Amino acid sequence: MKIGFDAKRAFLNKRGLGEYSRDIISCFKDNKNDIFLFTPGIGENIFKKNNKHKIVLPKYKNHIYKLYWRNKGIIKDLKKHNIEVYHGLSNELPYGIHKLNVKKITTIHDVTFKKHPYLFSRIQRNIYDKKTKYACKVSDIIVAVSKQTKKDIIKYYNVEEKKIKVIYQSCDDIFFKQYKGEKSKNNELYVICVGSIEERKNIKIIVKSVEDLIKEGIKIKLIIVSPE
């Protein structure tokens, strides 16, 4: 089977959406399927691709054409490579894909732009809403990363429940390995927060909580790790 992925974030995103994309694509390691990775660029190549996967890039490298290609022009390449299943890994599918005889899957991570619009500009809200609405309409299957996301999709986009599958995100194998290094001699407590520094990530709440614990006499350190 020929399976295509929207691999933009797998190659170009160092944050959560990139990690999710790389993890999903990396699951395909056998020879049973032909995997095509559609991306407007490779960038620093932070995605250690499987050499068996085929990378499909736009014909021209200028920024405007790349935007057009990913949102619509990619349809010609889906036809060219006879893609049978296409998975949009971050809330969107290319416009016009509903006209193709292709099984369409979209992962929707959240609809924060609908629930908390004040966190986004009007232009951002309109773009995200338009893309998500189209993806919800034309997808054969929608993957929601949580039960709450599933509820939100049904609420804001009136999608039939049976069309949505809740599949929780996995994590890297490194998180299953026990650390055997030297322990802290002072038995210090740490809180580690990993994520981008944005208002919607609730870092202020974490900082305030740690401050309250310190005021109560608990010795604890806060470490914030951000990709940017």
Image (tube, grey):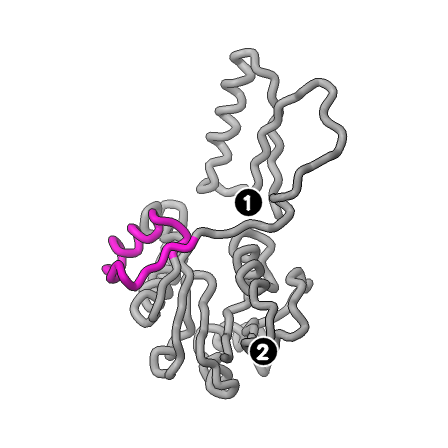
Is 103 colored magenta in this rendering? no
Q: Residue furthest right?
A: 182
Q: Which amino acid is tagged 2?
A: Val
Q: Where is residue 93? Give x, y as percent.
A: 41, 70
Q: Choose top left, top right, bottom left or bottom right for residue 98.
A: bottom left
Residue 145: within the magenta? yes
Residue at image x 42%, y 73%? 94
Q: Label 2, on which residue?
A: 56
Q: What mark, if any, has residue 160 been given in the picture? A: none
Q: Between residues 166 and 92, which one lies in front from this camera angle?
A: 166
Left or right of 43, for residue 118: left
Q: Point out which mark residue 196 bears.
A: 1
* Magenta stretch in the rendered image: 144-167
Q: Mark 2: which secondary structure? A: strand
Image position of 162 with respect to 180: above or below:
below
Q: Position of residue 23 (x, y in %)?
A: 56, 58
In this view, 59 is above or below 38:
below
The residue lying at 25 percent from left, 53 percent from top is: 155
Q: Quadrant of residue 13?
A: bottom right
